Image: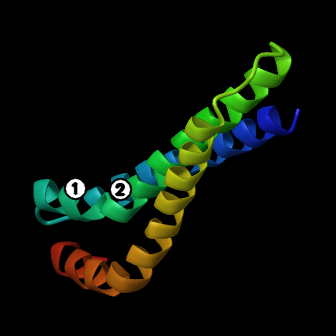
Amino acid sequence: ATGFFGGLIALIFGVLQLNYMNFYVSEVLAASYDPLLTLAVAWHFYSILRVIGFIILASTFFQMFMALVMRRPSRYSSLTWGMIIGLSLVIADGVCKWLFASNVQMTLKSLTNL
């Protein structure tokens, strides 16, 4: 059950983050002087890392759950790598945000009337 709920939680966080980013980008684009360039900057590359990380985590937890339900041995090496890669991407999002958020903010201010 832990794998199922872990996967479900990761999936929910991924969906919520995607919804939040879509709303944010649409608001920034509405205030933009150059929508095409703004789109490239507003969809922060580090947010994409987070979404991919949550997808990988959800898939990994679901694989763990299915192995338990089906009573089949799971491939622990692939599950371990799924956890490492998924968590690494979520952590990379935080590190990149910490390093680059102010630059992204300044760029977006120059492209919008916000």
Pointer 1 with pointer 2, Cβ within 8 A: yes
Q: Quadrant of the C terminus?
A: bottom left
> Which of the 4 image quadrants contains residue 29?
bottom left
Left/right of residue 39 with respect to residue 89 in the rendered view: left
Q: Residue at x 16, y 56 (%)?
A: 35
Nearest to the observer: residue 95 or residue 12: 95
Left/right of residue 24 with respect to residue 79 in the rendered view: left
Nearest to the observer: residue 32 or residue 19: 19
List the residue tagged with mark 1: 39
Within 10 angstroms of label 1, few (less than 14), some, or many (20 or more) residues? some
Q: Residue at x 60, y 49 (%)?
A: 83
> Which of the 4 image quadrants contains residue 110?
bottom left
Give SS at disc 1. helix
Left/right of residue 11 with respect to residue 19 in the rendered view: right
Please state which amino acid type lies under the numbered disc 1. Answer: Leu
> Which of the 4 image quadrants contains residue 106?
bottom left
Please state which amino acid type lies under the numbered disc 2. Answer: Val
Q: Could you tell me residue 51's position as x and y percent?
A: 48, 49
Q: Quadrant of the N terminus?
A: top right
Give SS at disc 2. helix
Q: Examine the rendering and report whether any part of residue 1 can be seen.
A: yes
List the residue tagged with mark 2: 25
